[in-house]
Amino acid sequence: MASATGAAGAAVVPFVPPGGRCLRASERNMLEGIVTAIVYGAVSAEVGLLVNERIVIDALVPNSTVAALGLKPGGRAVALIKPSFITLIDDVPGLALSARNLIGGTVVNVLTGPVEAECVLDIGEGRELTVLVTSHSARALELEAGRQILASFKASHIIVCALDG
């Protein structure tokens, strides 16, 4: 997926909808992958997206949207995840979560302000995940470069975009 860097290092990805006008997204967490499976429910489907050999993201997508986007196993898609929708947690044996997605990463950078902190995680194969937490949480988790941490987010907090071709 081609992307450019906008202000403050945010990725900007062009999107051309029907009609040919180009849209760009400011979301920093854009993870491209291959659709592995689609399991339909009454209203929404669970869409599996293989990001790399160790990460599969599960997203909840309305059935009508799955059809409108033409999502199918083997197709390419992008998961958009807002940084404030991600929770950081210590790797605790036996920890049970309701969030469907759990990704391990290494802290690359932490920018801490008086209220909020931005943490960038290396999740492997050149991919990063940006997370926003309170400054208090950043201190409590002792976030610093090199620290191993888990990122967790709900399947319903993901926007899925289909890629052509």
Image (cartoon, rainbow, N blue to C red):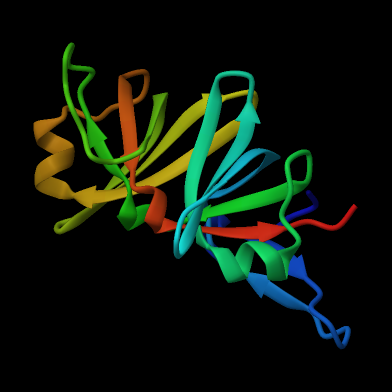
Q: How many marks?
A: 0
In the shown orientation, is residue 62 left or right of residue 89?
right
In the shown orientation, is residue 13 left or right of residue 25?
right
On the image, the x and y values in percent for residue 104 come to 39, 23
In percent of the image, x 16 and y 14: which residue is there?
A: 94
Which quadrant of the structure image shows residue 96? top left
Considering every residue shown, the one lying at the far front of the view is 42
On the image, the x and y values in percent for residue 119 come to 35, 41
On the image, the x and y values in percent for residue 7 come to 57, 65
Which quadrant of the structure image shows residue 39? top right
On the image, the x and y values in percent for residue 64 come to 60, 71
In percent of the image, x 56 and y 55: which residue is there?
A: 9
Can residue 68 be seen here? The reply is yes
Between 48 and 95, the one lying in front of the other is 48
Between 113 and 47, the one lying in front of the other is 47
In percent of the image, x 35 and y 24: which residue is there?
A: 145
Which quadrant of the structure image shows residue 89? top left
Considering every residue shown, the one lying at the far top of the view is 93
Can residue 113 be seen here? The reply is no
Q: Is residue 45 above or below residue 125?
A: below
In the shown orientation, is residue 159 left or right of residue 155?
right
In the shown orientation, is residue 1 left or right of residue 97?
right
